[in-house]
Amino acid sequence: NTGEKEIKEVALKLEQFRKVFTRLFPQMVFNTPVPTTVVVFKSQSSFAPFRPGANTAGYFQAGSDVNYIALTTEFYGDIDAFDVIFHEYTHLLVKNTFENAPLWFNEGLAEYYSTFKISDDRKVVIGSPISKHVYLLRDNKMLPFKELLEVDHKSPYYNESNKRGIFYAQSWALMHYLLI
């Protein structure tokens, strides 16, 4: 329910992201067996009834007949809408390529690639530090490595807002370390 300008901007950014990924990772599966619909809301309030959780800035939902990415172009706290778009699209690529990827891998990779920035249609930056993760890791006790690797969709570290941050931050840091 957002305007044409925002829809075009989302489409352009997704196509740029996809183009960069097809060059960086030619072995990844980019074509899905079902179509993907991107639903863009004009505001946080119009997105709210469709959010799976109160602290959800956007989401990817795989389906047997259609995949969905839902988000808003409006900032969500300190989260830029395009960070969310790239994060959620990374989930789509991971699902296509690694069907049963561990959650730390999936979320860590999505956070890593959420920092995608392109300028002048030619300059790409990926893997920038995520300040909120750096501060959270600096100021809090980290999960034991074994526990981090065992987090799944039923875990409190994935589902409870007061625990989710450290899981995302550590998953991002681990993937950042492995990739850089």
Image (spheres, rainbow, N blue to C red):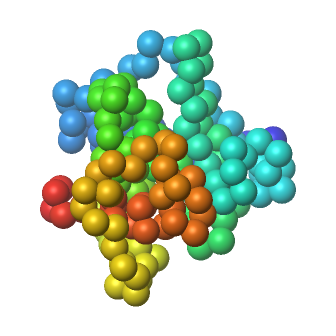
Which residue does the image show at 32% across and 40% down from the upper left? 102
Residue 79 visible to an observer of this rendering: yes
Q: What x and y, as percent, mark residue 141?
A: 36, 79
Quarter of the picture containing the N terminus is: top right
Asked where in the image residue 79 lies, by quadrant, the reply is: bottom right
Whole-percent x, y for residue 75 in the image:
66, 65
Q: Is residue 142 left or right of residue 43?
A: left
Asked whether 149 or 178 is in front, the reply is: 149
Which of the image's four quarters has the C terminus? bottom left
Q: Can residue 2 be seen in this view?
A: no
**Residue 175: where, in percent of width, then height?**
25, 57
Furthest-bottom residue in this view: 139
Q: Residue at x 65, y 41 (%)?
A: 70
**The one of 111 and 20 positioned closer to us in this rendering:** 111
Q: Position of residue 113 (x, y in %)?
A: 36, 53
Q: Quadrant of residue 77?
A: bottom right
Taking depth in this image into account, of 56 and 118 the one nearest to the observer is 56
Residue closest to the eye, 155 or 22 = 155
Task: Determine the residue positioned at 21% across, 36% down.
Answer: 25
- Residue at (40%, 57%) from the top-left corner? 111
Decide: is 34 above or below 146: above
Labels in figure, total: 0
Is 5 rendered above or below residue 36? below
Up-down relation of residue 97 to residue 174 (above or below):
above
